[in-house]
Amino acid sequence: SLFHYGLDSLMLVEFMHAIEEEFGAVLPIESQSMTLAEIALKIGLVNKSSSINLEKERAEYPLSRGQQGLFFLQQLMPENPAYNISTAVRIRSKVDFELLKEAFQKIIDRHPTLRTSFFIKDAKPVQKIETNTQVGFEIIDAHFWTEAEFREKLNQEILMPFDLRKAPLLRVKIYSRSQEEQILLLVIHHIISDLWSLAILIGELASFYEAGLKKVEPKLSPQQLTYSDYIDWQEKQILGQEGEELWHYWKEKLSGELPTLNLPSDFPRGSVQSYLGASYSIEIDQVVTDKLKFLSRQHQTTLYTTLLSAFQILLKRYSGQDDLLIGSPVAGRSRAGLANLIGYFVNMLVIRVDLSTDLSFLHFLDINKKTVQEAFRHQHYPFELLVEKLQPTRTTALSPVFQAAFVMQQAPSFVPKEVVGFALGTPSSRIKLGELELESFPLEKQTSLFDLTFNIAEVSNRLIVEIQYNKELFTSRTASQIISNFKNLLESVAADSSKPISNLSIISSQEKAFLLQHSRKDFSGKQIVSREIERIARERGEKVAIECEGREMSYGQMNEMANKIGRYLKRRGVKRESIVGIQVGRREEMVVSMLGVMKAAGAYVAMEQDYPRQRIEKMVEESRMEYVIVEEGRREQVEWMGVEIIELMREE
């Protein structure tokens, strides 16, 4: 089968393009598991009517389903830069800036999507191909800027929103810092581009620039299709029998209550999703990378699926949830004629996984392989339409359906593999494109579409893993810990993939030794928290202990209230090591309840009120909880827990 040759998902797409161009046959997406003999047979039998029909380019046409989603979000938050795609390079060779500008202009002239504007017409979003669109190309003298000033200017440019009504939705800035150092910054809106499109742009930039130097015409393959052809094909597919079959699959796969990912965060979630983010990256060495690639080939799957499986296990460890939904993008270019077009083709797949059984990693990988293959077979149903038809509970605080994403960055074969290093901003990544020699210039990521996104790329035979996170939920320290745990997990899988999932380690041997050493410390003579609070209450009872939402509570008041709760808990039967749940929200009552449980010699388990029921059930079961403290009037909402209920304000 094609697995034997090490084809990943992107190489499979390009293989399918080659078959379509050579034989006129459109292979099914599951071709990766077929043998060469089966593919040869399929070429002779496949129905060729599913190809896209070429139409004359139109000046105005509707948006694709993916574009509609982005347009809607941009209308809600016009100043939101979350969908700006930015990349920067240091130019290491001599450069003719006039020729470089001319090369960018020719790319815009060649690709209608780069000359497209978006607006509302007759109450519907429309895109229009503009004429005589000039590239936004500017050379900026940055010789006398400090490093801090330069970074600040870069960040301002990256975060500057686009007006979708004005083409081009692309900006090119050259920052001249010295005679030897020129930094090129490219910012483009996601509604007209994706990673594959950036690879096309980089490749054509080199072709046009080199052709300009030599005063010849570049050798570029003609474009067989237009983006409007793709939209027509997508609509025809959605409204036809194939669309019905795709919808039936996803409706069944995502039936029931959809779980919300609840990772332990450093800060409470706000009422509105801010998209403020940051990133942190690490490297997986070549030895571990090679072992993971060998494991993938041995078990007839891709490195993507192996890494995704590890990511899902990591999220289970952090959230305690067995039912997980992960978003993962696919290129969306299943037809050969779309391969050399710049545009927004990517579609988000939802991968749902059940981790309730403690299987071996290999067994879980086999199950997950089938799940991923099924999802890829049904990849052409637009995520935006899926959300519209599923109608999940919507909130401005969360992204719909999934809150974590997994991305395997891969470059098409027509550009150097090093381009993926540029996508992640890997320091010192270099490529030579004709006469242009470029080096990656890392940018500070300042947005995050989801709570957590893992971006992974293979660079120079090693894996680069980047975590992009919502910094209103997590600190940089927490993000670095999460990604370090992922690295340890991959090393554990590479060392012994036959282990049960629960036995795979997310901490290093050094961390384990450190924890064991410090767990043996002698704490005799140390004061416990509740006693220390009592001491402070005696000595400085009037001192403010808690501030919350404009309210204050002194140490004396806090200790007095905690004593009342502790005495009441004892009367209700709480004794040494009784497990007491606390679900009163993040207010002063939470702190006082914790102290009260300590004073009754019990142990507390803090629970958020918006945790999914499945997660709370797991916490109650695994902790062997006997009691739960709730706010006054919430008894009926928690009776299903099956534990003794203590209403805080009424019964304290």
Image (cartoon, rainbow, N blue to C red):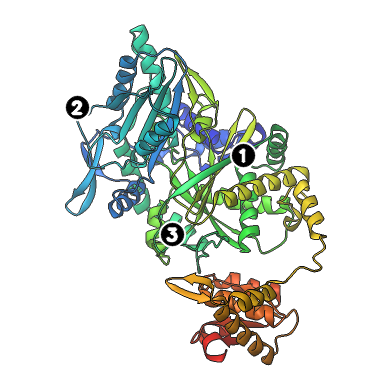
Q: CA distance from mark 2 to mark 3?
A: 39 Å
Residue 557 horizontal/vertical position (percent): 55, 81
First in sequence: mark 1 vs mark 2: 2
- Dot 3 falls on a residue whose secondary structure is loop
First in sequence: mark 2 vs mark 3: 2
Determine whether label 1 and label 2 are within 8 Å by CB.
Answer: no
Residue 93, quarter of the rendered image = top left
**Residue 586 badge:** none
- What amino acid type should be assigned to the residue bearing mark 2? Asn
Residue 475 horizontal/vertical position (percent): 54, 52
Q: Is residue 582 above or below residue 370?
A: below
Quadrant where the C terminus sits is: bottom right
- Dot 1 falls on a residue whose secondary structure is strand
Q: Name the foreground residue: 128 vs 46.
A: 128
- The outermost residue toward the front is 539
- Dot 2 falls on a residue whose secondary structure is loop
Q: Is residue 264 above or below residue 569?
A: above
Query: Which residue is rendered at x = 27% and y = 27% of the image?
Result: 135
Residue 185 horizontal/vertical position (percent): 39, 29
Q: CA distance from mark 1 to mark 2?
A: 44 Å
Q: Name the foreground residue: 245 vs 340.
A: 340
Q: Name the foreground residue: 445 vs 347.
A: 445
Quadrant where the N terminus sits is: top right
Q: Which residue is mark 1?
A: 282
How many callouts does the rendering have?
3
- What amino acid type should be assigned to the residue bearing mark 1? Ile
Q: CA distance from mark 1 to mark 3?
A: 29 Å
- What amino acid type should be assigned to the residue bearing mark 3? Pro
Q: Which residue is mark 2?
A: 132
Residue 296 horizontal/vertical position (percent): 68, 41
Q: Is residue 139 above or below residue 50?
A: above
